[in-house]
Amino acid sequence: MEHITLLLGIVIVTALVFDFTNGFHDTANAMATTISTGALKPKTAVAMSAVLNLVGAFLSVEVAKTISGGLINEEGIRTEVIFAALVGAILWNLLTWLLGLPSSSSHALFGGLIGAAVMSAGWSSVNGSTVVTKVLLPAVAAPIVAGLAAMLATRLTYRISDRAGQKATAKGYRAGQIASAGLVSLAHGTNDAQKTMGIITLALVTGGVIAPGSNPPTWVIVSAGTAIALGTYLGGWRIIRTMGKGLTDLAPQQGFAAQTSAATAILASSHIGFSLSTTQVCSGAVMGSGLGRKGGVVRWSTATRMFVAWGLTLPAAGLAGAAAEFLTKQGTWGIVLTGALLVAGAGAIWTLSRRQPVTIDNVNDAAEPAGVVTTAMAAVTPPPAGPVTGDLSGDLKTTIPSPDAEPTRPATV
């Protein structure tokens, strides 16, 4: 085995930086609903999520093997290609974080990797069947399945609540929401942390350090799990606010249903090696829970922007990865310039984010006012059934005329 070169070391560090951005970009997947409903305080929520992300990284390596040995052909791929792919993925992650859009870190990584590989070795370097079956099809099916499951689960939970009394069950649903949020965090670790493991393993293969088809070494699993846990603890408050308050208004019953549905879909996909987007699954579940509640609505203006970001992620990250690979092919100066552009771009995005910061103190503020469609739907949709509070008899008497009362006649002059 060869020793790790300087370039390979830079690629490994860059991969861990991507893993860190993946952590704070995707914290919202597990904890946005828990924070928005008040089931957990923000700092407690992200700390719990960070620990469970780290634990989840050790549970499976199936997704890592899909990326390291299935997405692209390892033969002929240089280490610089991995570096270029990570540059494209990181920049797209930071841009969507700045905009508060819960886009897919997974698809950013896949797009960057595909774009860089095509620029380096042509379209034959990409395994098209793997891309279709384990990336594109899950991207379409997973949020729909999770959304439908969350919608049905929400209706079921409200039916149970109505029979047992909503006040009596609210505390239990908050506890269930905390447990289901922990399950989503664990699932996130088994899926997203493995993507960085797969990238580092692929880089080690291209550098001749390990043999093709090898499982990720233990130190790779530990470092990737630690990086995503640290990023998660930092808290991506912008995307947490969009997911928790921007898509719909959630009650504990809805949060429990959404998180349970999302965790089930993510864990099932991790088991069979589907590298799906946890962001898309959790977003679909949140929208499904919003539609499942009687009187609940989805803010379609926010959802539309999110859908656009989903559609742009693969091609945009792919173009960025291809551009970065074009520079790295020029030699040492191109690699240095690519790294400098990454640092400059990250610094510019961070500076822009400070103009309107989203922090732990304002994360539960409304993300944006309701749009025209949402307002119209709320006006014609009946509110959720519940007990009538207060004495409304006075108001009813003043607004509803007695059947025996004569209609008021206009005065005559």
Image (cartoon, rainbow, N blue to C red):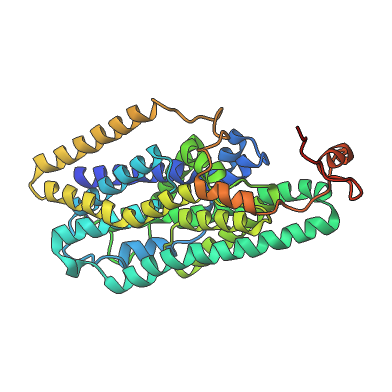
Residue at 26% across, 65% down: 72
In the rendered view, does 291 fall on the left or right side of 337? Answer: right
Identified at 44% across, 54% down, the residue is 192
Q: Quadrant of the N terminus?
A: bottom left
Q: Nearer the viewer, residue 275 or 99?
A: 99
Measured from the top left, where is residue 344 in percent x and y?
24, 32
Question: In the image as oriented, which residue stretches furthest toward the right?
Answer: 404
The one nearer the camera, 213 or 172, is: 172
Residue 272, horizontal then vertical, whole percent: 47, 70
Q: In the image shown, does 273 or 390 lie closer to the viewer?
A: 390
Residue 399: x and y in percent read 81, 41
Instruction: Work out whether 315 lies above or below 152.
Output: above
Quarter holding the C terminus? top right
Residue at 24% across, 38% down: 342
- Taking 207 as reference, is 74 above or below it? below
Residue 267, image quadrant: bottom right
Q: Nearer the viewer, residue 306 or 256?
A: 306
Instruction: Residue at 19%, 35% (x, y): give it.
Output: 340
Q: Residue furthest front?
A: 413
Q: How many marks?
A: 0
Query: Would residue 196 be visible to someone looking at this image?
Result: no
